[in-house]
Image: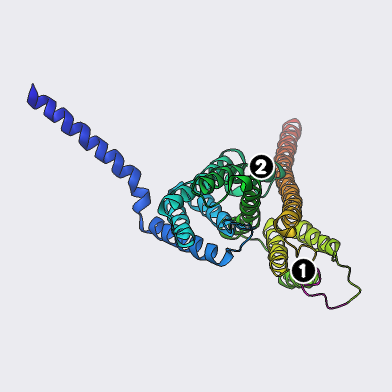
Amino acid sequence: MSISRTYVRQGHMSEVLRTLENKLRPYVEPGNLATIAFLALCYFFVGEIGIRPATPNHSVTAIWLPAGISLAAFLLRGYRVWPGHLLGAFLLSVAIRHSILISVGLAGANTLEVLIAAYLVNKYANGINAFFRTRDFLRFVIFAAMFAPALCATLGVGVLCMGGIARVADFPAVWFVWWVGDMLGVLFLTPFLVLLLGHKHHSIGLGEPLEVTALIAGLSITCVLNFGHQPMSWIPQNGLLFLCAPFLAWSALRFCPLEAAGATLVMGGFAKWGSLHGLGPFGNPIGLPLFVGGFLAVGTAITLTVAAACAEQKNATRDALGMYCVLKDVKEGEIRVLQETVEALQIELEMKGSRRTAASSD
C-alpha cells in the first residue's frame, strides 16, 4: 500500500513538473529572453532620459514614454515579456529613489497597468489591429490610455504617500500628473510602434516619400513657430496652434494610420520640448502638464480617430470592390456557360434538321 502511494505521489510530482516546464518554456526561449532584456534596457534608459521635475516632489513626469513602449511590446510579443517591464521599472525606481521596498511597489503598479491595458485591448479592441477601425481605437483610448493609467496612478501615488516621498495633501496633483504622463506615453508611442513593427506598410504611390517629407517639414516648421523661440514679433503670445490642424488632417486623410501616428509624435515632441524650456503657449508651471497634456491628448485622439475612420472606409471600399469583381466573374462565367449551351443546342437542332431533310428526300 505504501509503495503504491509512493508511485502515485511520484507520478503526481512528475506531472506537476511537466506542467510547470510547459508553462515556463515560452519565457526561456532565446527570442523571448532577448525581448525581455531589450525591453528592460529600453524602459530604464528612456525613463532616465525622460525624467523631469514635473511636480513638487519630483516623483512623476508629464509624458512617460516607457509606458507606451511597454504596452507596444506586450501587444506585439504577448504577456510573456512582463519580466522585462518589471525589471526595468524596478531598476529605474531604485536608481531614482534608492528604496527597494518602494521600488517594488511602484514596479508592481506599473506592470499591473500594462498587463490590464494589454488584456483589455486584446479582448475588446482587436489587439494590434485597434488602429484601423473607429470603434476599436476609441476602446483603445478608454481602456489603455485612460482606465489603466488611472488605476496605476492611484496605486503608484498611494505607494509614494505611504513611503513618505509624496504628501497626502499633494495626492490629487501628483495623481493627475502621473495619469496624464502615462496616458500621453500610450497615445504617442504605442500606436506608432505597433503600426510600424506589427503591420506591413503599403505605399500609395511613387511620390509618397516626397509627400511625407513635405508633411513632416511643414508640421515641424509650424511647431517651431508655436513651441520654440518666436522669430517674428507679430506672432501672438498664444502661438499659431490652429496651423497644426491642416497638417494633422493631411496625415489622417491622405495616408495610413502609421503616418498619422508619426505626425502626432512629431507635434508632441516639439510641444514637450518647448514647454520644458519655458517656450510657447504652454511654457509656464501650470501649462505642463495641465494644458499641454490636454492639447496633445485631444489632438492625438482626434487625428488617430479620423485616420482609423479613413482606414475603415478604405477597407470597406476595397472589400466591396473585391466582392463586385468576384460577382462579376461569376456572372460572366454563368453567361459564358449559357452561351455555350445555346450554341450547342443550335448545333444539335441544325444537325437534327439536316437529318430530317435527308430522310425526307430519301
Is 227 included in the stretch rendered in magenta? Answer: yes
Amino acid type for the residue under numbered disc 2: Ile
Q: Is residue 36 above or below residue 118?
A: below
Q: Is residue 82 visible?
A: no
Residue positioned most to the right:
234
Picture quarter with the N terminus: top left
Q: Residue at x 12, y 29 (%)?
A: 6
Disc 1 designates what residue? 227
Q: Is residue 112 left or right of residue 205?
A: left
Kindly indicate the quadrant of the structure image that contains residue 231.
bottom right
Is 191 included in the stretch rendered in magenta? Answer: no
Which disc is residue 50 wearing? none
Q: Is residue 208 above or below residue 100?
A: below
Kindly indicate the quadrant of the structure image that contains residue 339.
top right
Front residue of this view, candidates 143 and 227: 227
Q: Is residue 235 visible?
A: yes
- The reply to whether callout 2 and callout 1 are in contact (CB within 8 Å) is no
> In this figure, which colouring scheme has been used for the structure?
rainbow
The location of residue 276, given as percent across then percent down, is: 69, 66
What stretch of residues is rendered in magenta? 224-232
The location of residue 358, given as percent across then percent down, is: 73, 35
Q: Is residue 155 left or right of residue 16?
A: right
Mark 2 vs mark 1, CA separation in Å: 28 Å
Residue positioned most to the bottom:
231
Q: Residue at x 75, y 65 (%)?
A: 283
Front residue of this view, candidates 348 and 63: 63
The location of residue 81, given as percent across then percent down, is: 44, 52
The location of residue 298, given as percent across then percent down, is: 75, 51
| Dot 2: element | helix
Picture quarter with the C terminus: top right
Q: Residue at x 61, y 62 (%)?
A: 53
Disc 2 designates what residue? 142
